[in-house]
């Protein structure tokens, strides 16, 4: 037993458990994304990867400006289609029912 401690096997076991937990979290996140994509997103987005989805929906260039006393997110004209998509996805998520 002392040889195992000397070789650092206890640290190795801790690291492998941490890797297993990290892997399981990644698998759950991937499965949640697939379910979200199938249940909430438009059918044309079914073939999108996580990176494409992130690029199309989340990484939208814009700036926050104050106009007429209101705070507005100003985006380039080619990204103005993202807002209605995002609203429809959010609406579909809100209306999902939990099956027990």
Image (cartoon, grey):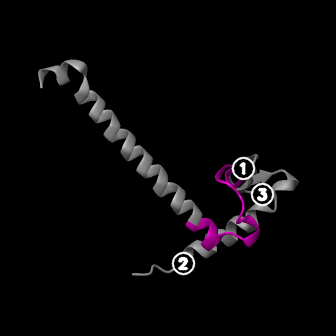
Q: Residue furthest left?
A: 1
> Was residue 26 drawn as part of the magenta stretch in this picture?
no
Residue 5, image x, y percentages: 18, 23
Q: Which residue is mark 3?
A: 68
Mark drawn on residue 96: 2
Mark drawn on residue 55: 1
**Distance in Å between CA atoms under marks 2 and 1:** 25 Å
Q: What residue appears at the point 63 percent right and 66 percent down from the top-left corner? A: 37
32 and 73: which is toward the camera: 32
Residue 61, image x, y percentages: 76, 46
Q: Secondary structure at mark 1?
A: helix
State which region is magenta: 35-55
Do labels 2 and 3 touch, CB within 8 Å? Answer: no
| Badge nearest the viewer, 2 or 3 | 2
Magenta stretch prevailing secondary structure: helix
User: Considering only vertical position in the picture, is 1 above or below 19?
Assistant: above
Left or right? Give the position of 38 relative to 85: left
Do labels 2 and 1 touch, CB within 8 Å? Answer: no
**Distance in Å between CA atoms under marks 3 and 1:** 31 Å
Quick one: label 3, few (<14), some, or many (20+) residues within 10 Å?
few
Quick one: label 2, few (<14), some, or many (20+) residues within 10 Å?
few
Q: What residue appears at the point 70 percent right and 48 percent down from the top-left corner? A: 59
User: Considering only vertical position in the picture, is 8 above or below 25?
Assistant: above
Q: Secondary structure at mark 3?
A: loop
In primary-sequence order, the first of circles 3 and 1 is: 1
77 and 5: which is toward the camera: 5
């Amino acid at each position: 037993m002392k040889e195992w401690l000397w070789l650092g096997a206890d640290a190795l076991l801790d690291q492998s458990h941490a890797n297993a937990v990290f892997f399981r979290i990644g698998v759950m996140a991937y499965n949640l994304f697939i379910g979200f994509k199938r249940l909430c997103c438009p059918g044309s987005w079914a073939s999108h990867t996580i990176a494409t989805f992130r690029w199309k929906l989340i990484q939208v260039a814009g700036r926050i400006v104050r106009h007429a006393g209101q705070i507005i997110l100003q985006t380039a004209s080619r990204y103005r289609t993202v807002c209605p998509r995002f609203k429809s996805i959010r609406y579909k998520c809100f209306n999902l029912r939990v099956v027990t």
